[in-house]
Amino acid sequence: MRSSDPASRRPSSRLSWSGTGASVLLAIVVAVSAAYYPAWRGAPVWDDDGHITKPELQSVDGLRRIWLEPGATQQYYPVLHSAFWFEHRVWKDAPVGYHLTNIVLHSIAAFLIFLLLRELGVLGAMLAAFVFAVHPVHVESVAWISEQKNTLSAVLCLLSAIAYVRFDESRDRRVYLAALAWFVLALLAKTVTAMMPALLAIVAWWRRGRVDVRRDIVPLIPFAAAAAAAGGWSAWIEHSVIGAQGIEFQLTLAQRCLIAARAIVFYLAKLVWPAQLTFNYPKWTMDPQVWWQTLFPLALIGCITALWTIRVRSRAPLAALLAFCALVFPALGFLNVYPFRYAFVADHFQYLASVPIIAFLCAGLTLGLSGQPLMLTRVAASVLLVSLGTLTWMQSRDYADAETLYRSILRRNPDSWFAHNNLGSMLLQQGHYEAARPHLEAALRLSPSVWEPYANLGLLRLRAGPIDEAPYFFTEAL
């Protein structure tokens, strides 16, 4: 690999905890805490109440049920719900404790990214860690209590990756077992981490230019087996327990391919230009007969082909793109996930997947500024981080409470049946019947094939009339 590769530098020494390491971690915590300050006291939103430990699970026996009774929690993520169980012993139902926990976990994840990139010898490791820490595309994962599954699983996955990279150099069996143990814990926190074996194979190709079966593939077999088992179980839970089935998930293979390609382009665009971020994006209508929709897979294929042709000069661009695609694969549409009822993309789907792209872009920026005066480099980095941090601060205000969140969605996506229905339902429960009516009617108009608007409009008529219309809406809901 030539020295022009943005990720070709080898680290001179490992980072020690004292000195630089502690300073970097402290700086990251301060930056994240400041950027997410508006969300510190945010009230629970949407399904947060389904993740904060329910009364029937708050006992010691409840902890046993979390591990041994699938269905006791919203998803079978026992490590995640054990963390929530312990947090509830400390914070009870106070949202601030869960938000601060998420902020700490996100800060640790950013610091581990720094350590991992240093271990791999990637230029701009510190810049990449700070960009990850304050990038607004991660607000959904950090400010939303439910997505502690993202921050916690990322920490565990990154610990596994660091251990595996060290095993790759030392071939120490104890380090290997530690990497495998961290990975299993990550899977039990969120199975999106199941793609890490693919990531490690890509890293091996990037570092050495080839993938050796004995050196690179055989050690990953136990990781792949654990990932397959966890992924299969999680897919069954999504389909049979959570409800990712029905007319909204009846997509052809061609439609799923179009969704996947467009989602990849969408996520990359939001990483580079994080404008108009929202909790609920418009749901695309995918039709292979519409010619311009085929431009997304064609562009993706063309980009991969072009990067393959320049691999002799640098393997980093292709490795970064392939790693990104691998990590985001579970949410590309080939597997049914419940949020696809509302949209085919969501910011929290690319939380971990953003790391290789951020690392590559920061390495390129660092290389590009390497010949410039130190002051100019620091100013450029500061402007970038302050800009991203400001956007994160503004975005995190949307998570003050559920009503604020739903209204923020409607400002950016006025055709969101999800936001109209949930906001209308809230207003209905508060007794604001006439304020709820237009939102519930809009939800029904926008998505007449889902049951929730019918049920809410039935309740509205029971409470505010005309009562004789209520049976029709309840029948339609059923």
Image (cartoon, grey):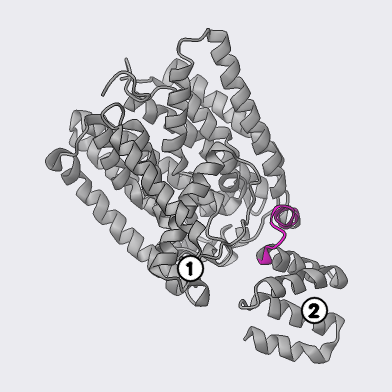
Q: In which quarter of the image is residue 219?
A: top left
Which amino acid is tagged 2?
Answer: Leu
Q: Where is residue 382 in the image (x, y as percent from the top left)?
A: 60, 21
**Magenta stretch bounds:** 404-417
Q: Which image quarter holds the N terminus?
A: top left
Residue at the location (63% across, 22% down)?
Answer: 383
Q: Is there any visible trace of residue 259 in the rendered image?
A: yes
Q: Which of 268 and 144 is in front in this view?
A: 268
Task: Work out how far the residue at label 1 is from the one at label 2, CA to CA, in angstroms.
Answer: 32 Å
Evaluate whether residue 68 shows in this view: no
Q: Mark 2 points at which residue?
A: 460
Please tell me whether the stretch drawn in magenta is mainly helix, strand or loop: helix
Quarter of the C terminus within the rendering: bottom right
- Residue 65 locus on image (x, y percent): 44, 65
Q: Residue at x 57, y 36 (%)?
A: 135
At label 1, the amino acid type is: Ala
In this rendering, would 84 be left or right of 318?
right
The vertical placement of 63 against 387, above or below, is below
Residue farthest along the front direction in this orientation = 291
